[in-house]
Amino acid sequence: MSGAPTAAFPRAGRSRLRAALAACALALTGAAGLATAPGAARAATVPTPDHTVVVVFENHSYSQVVGTSSAPYITSLANGGANLTQSYALTHPSQPNYFDLFSGSTQGVTNDTCPPPGSPYSTANLGSELLAAGRTWASYNEGLPSQGSTTCSNSAGRYARKHNPWFSFTNVPASSGFTFAQFPTDYTTLPNVSFVVPNLCNDMHDCSVSTGDTWLKSKLDAYAQWATTHNSVLVVTFDEDNSLSGNRIATIFYGAHVKQGAYSTRYNHFNVLRTLEDMNGTTHAGSAATATPITEIWQ
């Protein structure tokens, strides 16, 4: 019997068999490589959340917020989510930064005048892009006197339109601007993307970092925790710093798909806008078209 294999498979035959087996193994390895390639490609892109809520605070630098005793809740989001440690606003004062974040351009705005010079605008922006792509959009504006109001201010509610650029575009329905009281408790009814803008006290403009931090925990922690298990994301950012820190601001992503960690790549409002656009498959507004999406923070 020991000679049977030799008779059936002479030396030349065994060599050919080994070569064939090696080729088969190589083919299988190549197939495995091809199978993992799409996963690698996905890792270099962004997810498609069902809901993304962006909250914008005011006029504080990164070092005034993250890691401080004044902002334990925001710090907990930074520690539990993606903390962009080199995130920057683009200009001063407030209003141009909001336009940058929403439309990839200041639209020529250089001050906080309401309504801003040259408005209303018809240029592309996150809201119009989402609607054109069949996605949904809304803003929730604390202190806004009524849904769709384009008033410049409301002293009773400490509201300021300079922090709400969507009301300055003809291609974004004013009716998509809600009061914060209309923010749903059933988070499944949220639009695909929404911005939440606290009033002049709770956004830290007129009141303390601690006030804004407490407000965020009280109003949106339930959503933040829900988001982690419901394919949704919370983004917390600032319009600008306190004019003393090179415009370095806190920007945090928290929720489903987010890979916990501190990320030192330099980003700005255009990168955040580009990421929101790519998460929803839209076109790109203004300078977001040439900005790099934030891809390293996703699982």
Image (spheres, rainbow, N blue to C red):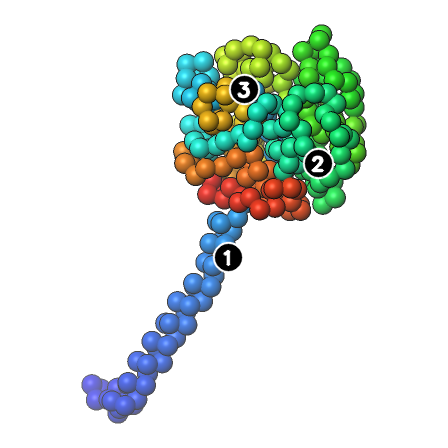
Cα–Cα span, label 3 and label 2: 24 Å
Name the amino acid, label 2. Answer: Gly
> Which residue matches tag 2?
127
Which badge, 1 or 2, comes first in the chain's sequence?
1
For the question of whether residue 122 can be seen, the reply is yes
In the visual, does 141 lie left or right of 120? left
Please name whichever residue, 246 or 216, is drawn nearer the observer in this view of the structure: 246
> Disc 1 and disc 3: Cα gap in Å?
41 Å
Identify the residue under disc 1.
38
Please name the residue shown 32% across and 81% down the image.
19
Task: Note whether residue 231 is visible.
Answer: no
For marks 3 and 2 on the same chain, the one whose residue lies earlier in the sequence = 3
Looking at the rendered image, the quarter that the N terminus falls into is bottom left
Tell us which disc is closer to us: 1 or 3: 3
Q: Dividing the picture into quarters, in which one does residue 291 lie?
A: top right
Mark 1 or mark 2: which is in front? 2
Question: Foreground: 253 or 59?
Answer: 59
Q: Amino acid at mark 3?
A: Asn
Residue placed under numbered mark 3 in the picture: 59
Q: Residue at x 45, y 58 (%)?
A: 36
